Image (cartoon, grey):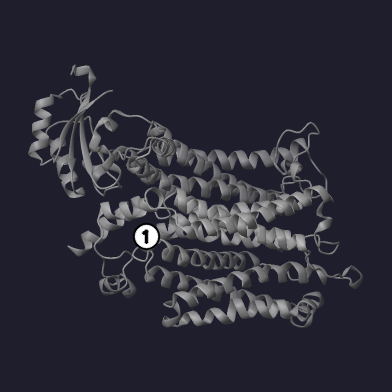
Amino acid sequence: MSAGQPPFDSPEIRRLSPVIGPGYTYGSVTDKISAIVLTRPTSLGWYVGFLIAFSVMGMMTVAIGWLIIKGTGIWGINIPIGWGFAIVNFVWWIGIGHAGTLISAILFLLNQKWRTSINRFAEAMTLFAVACAGIFPLIHTGRPWLAFYMMPYPSTMGLWPQFRSPLIWDVFAVSTYGTVSLMFWFVGLIPDLATLRDRSIRKPLQIIYGLLSLGWRGSARHWHRYQSAYLLLAGLATPLVLSVHTVVSFDFAIAIVPGWHTTIFPPYFVAGAIYSGFAMVLTIAIPLRKAYALEDFITMRHLDNMAKVMLATGLIVAYGYFFEFFLSLYSGNKFDVFLVQQRLHGPYAPFYFALILSNILVPQLLWSYKVRHNVVVLFLMSIVVNIGMWLERFVIVVISLTRDFVPSAWGRYSPTFWDWATLIGTMGMFATLLFLFVRVLPAISIAEMRELVAETSEEEK
Amino acid sequence: MRPSDLYGVMGEFGTPEELLEAVKKVRQAGYRRLDAYAPFPIEGLSDALGLKRNLVPAITLLGGLAGGIGGFGFQYWAAAITYPLNIGGRPLNSWPAFIPVTFELTILGASLAAVFGMLALNRLPHPHHPVFNVARFTHASSDRFFVCIEAKDPNFHLEKCARLLQEVHAHHITEVSND
């Protein structure tokens, strides 16, 4: 360690709050993590949880099925609010997806060792969140079987997508993000799949994990190229993760609707995305480490760091809210000023105040060391932030669209049962995928944990 | 065992340090066709094996360039040549509006090239390999480190190689057969 290291990474701190519990060897980390998949009996809790999640996902299937039969009229959308829950939920889910890539790519480039035990499931969470997000614009088209119109393909009509439209940018940004996240996740999984292949006793498992591991044998020549590919992917994913929510914010910012047409949107959307993503990582990590006794791998240090990232990004978001407010008033534009009044006193004001409470006020508790180290409070707070971030998108979409320039174009919006069924249903899908993931794949990167063991044992010498 | 059936001779080690030491000694003894196997990437192992810079970064750059140039070129072609839409006389080549898609496709091209380039250079997928014939090799993916001197090495001689591995304190020394 060079003399310029910041004090918070001092050996003293590392000893007091380690990123891995003491006494682990290469063999024991491998055993402990692979046992969750291979040898430990599936607990009753897993079956119950999976069953609940799967039923909720069934509700989504019904809601989407009914939508396809009846059309988007079953939703609460109307003419000023052509974008109802579909876009609110899309932006919310995509935002949640951002933490995975942030943890795996940006913290990797910054050489933050504490990312190691949380990156795998955070990446999985990203993929599942992107999958949930992708559903909404798709079904919002009304005729999802024609969604391929958005892709540039040589049609018999000689038509091409309108590349100047933020909605087409979204198609490219989200599909690139999904693809790159999937590859990043899979590349990270290859050595672990080889571990599972070598440690499973049953032939079918050996064959399945063997095929998935692509025959990885840990050759130094392979590692050599693997490491450069992984580093490059991290470098590529870093600007990508910042670009995706920027492009999502363009969906709003490019339009001239009051409250949307502002240059602060891209950075404030990105900060909000990371904020909600870290909240979701905490929501998942806290029960996961409890259920599988992974307290030695996902230590208090991890939870504490994640809480700090949440606090920091939450403050950026608060800054965004403040400047949105200030710029509207300072602009002197009467439509913008009116919108601010509508947020404070309009029919949707309770949502705005709930948003301020859950995104700005409640997270200030994270300044306290005691709060950051109280697992239950942290878990509840992560849920509050998730709700708050959903409210933020609701406020942005609904208040602006119901109160734009001409009073004759004003309206009201209220979601129907089917709107709620789809939103809650995607949460079921998200949970179902997570339950399956922790059951069949290592939720913590085994190869990277071994590397961590090697590094920590070197430091002790 | 006929010499052609022999893939090489393999020694097992318990720690990354022992492995590094062994690789250096084996290289010093003049062997070049050898490989090391480890459950995680080990610092200095590539240098010890004399691995040069690999092609993955160059392939990634090419993929990124192809994605970026192809992405912009395609949008230009679609918006300005094959399907021009005159909207209030605005320029057809409205390049700032093409940047987001160009950017995304650059990243996509580079990432696809990095992953598939790495797999292709590593000759993966490769479900079966002679080293898997060694029973203890299942530990190469958890807690053991291996060095294999391959029979293709011009200096290869089974007894000499086995003795060399013994000298560098390999725990188990096994012949690796080709099938």
| Residue drawn at the location 75% of the way across and 61% of the way down | A419
Residue B31 spot, x, y in % from top left:
17, 30
| Residue drawn at the location 58% of the way across and 64% of the way down | A273
Horizontal placement of A152 versus A238: left or right?
right
In this rendering, the answer to whether A411 lies above or below B71 is: below
Q: Chain of mark 1?
A: A
The C terminus of chain A lies in which quarter of the figure? bottom left
Splitting the image into 4 quarters, where does residue B166 fall?
top left
Q: Nearer the viewer, residue A30 or A122?
A: A30
- The residue type indicated by label 1 comes to Asn
| Residue drawn at the location 42% of the way across and 42% of the way down | B57
Residue labelled with disc 1: A111
Q: Nearer the viewer, residue A179 or A152?
A: A179
The N terminus of chain A lies in which quarter of the figure? bottom left
| Residue drawn at the location 46% of the way across and 41% of the way down | B114
Count of all numbered marks drawn on residues in the image: 1
Residue A293 spot, x, y in % from top left:
38, 63
Residue A344 spot, x, y in % from top left:
74, 82
